[in-house]
Amino acid sequence: MSHERDEDLPAEERRERSDGLLTTGDMARLTGNTLRTVRFYEEAGILRPDRRSSGGHRLFSHRELERLQFISDMRIAGLSLDEIRTLLELKLRAETGQEAAQAALSALDEQLHGIERKMEVFARLVLELRQTRAILRGCEKCENHRCFPDACDECEVMTQHEDVPLAMRVLWSVDGKSS
């Protein structure tokens, strides 16, 4: 996903309007989203154009651009649209700043915990997949017709590893323990 800001783009790619507003296309391009996604979020009520141009095009402020980037990042982190909407509306639903802050802290703590759990899984998967790729490099030149496809456990590529990673065991149907 792109996180470029207009000022980071070459002059010929910037389409600054004199009023500083951004078109739907600008919003999509600057956040790595599609036009359809930006329109969907607007129709869902979580993005709000400041106004429409004389030609009827939606025009957004830089604050909405930041909002879209936050929404996009939260979607990538695995939050549902309803969870994101709830976060975005916390302040509006509260009667006091204290109530809003407490609700936001609670919601953010919950989301942080979920993201941290996912990060642990992602870190484990990165290691698993890298180890699996390393073993598969040995399988790339496989001419061992005696072992492939049903006896890969017996192949020296597998037996030279004390523990074969889960991903390799699942993908190659091997038990993964050296004999």
Image (tube, rainbow, N blue to C red):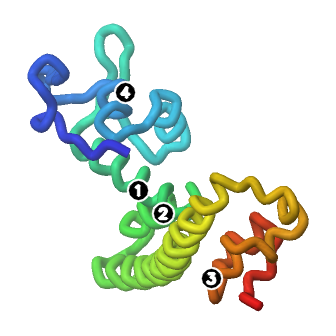
Kind of residue at badge 3: His
Look at discs 4 and 3 and give the one toward the viewer. Answer: 3
Residue 70, relative to residue 103: is it above or below? above
Amino acid type of the residue that numbered disc 2 sits on in the rendered structure: Ala
Q: Residue at x 60, y 62 (%)?
A: 138
Q: Mark 1 or mark 4: name the one nearer the start of the chain.
A: 4
Ranked by sequence position, the earlier of labels 2 and 3 is 2
Residue named by callout 4: 24
| Circle 1 Cα neighbour tier, 10 Å, few/some/many (<14 / 14–19 / ≥20) | some
The residue positioned 14% from the left and 17% from the top of the image is 12
Q: Closer to the N terminus: mark 4 or mark 3?
A: 4
Q: Quadrant of the N terminus?
A: top left
Hey, what amino acid is under mark 1? Asp
Q: Dot 1 lies on which element?
A: helix
Q: State the mark number for residue 77.
A: 2
The residue at which mark 3 appears reads as 161
Residue drawn at (43%, 50%) of the image: 72
Q: Disc 1 marks which residue?
A: 73
Q: In this rendering, which labeled residue sits more in front, label 1 or label 3? A: 3
Mark 4 crowd level (few <14, some 14–19, many ≥20, 10 Å Cα): many
**Residue 19 image offset from top left, x and y in percent:** 13, 25
How far apart marks 1 and 4 lie (CA) works out to: 18 Å
The structure residue drawn at horizontal position 40% and vertical position 73%, both measured from the top left corner, is 94
Mark 1 or mark 3, which has the lower sequence index?
Answer: 1
**CA gap, disc 1 to disc 3?**
39 Å
Image vertical order of residue 68 relative to residue 170, above or below: above
3D distance between C-alphas at marks 1 and 2: 6 Å
Task: Say which of 98 and 134 sits in front.
Answer: 134
Which structural element holds mark 4? Answer: helix
* Mark count: 4
Disc 1 and disc 3 in contact, CB within 8 angstroms: no
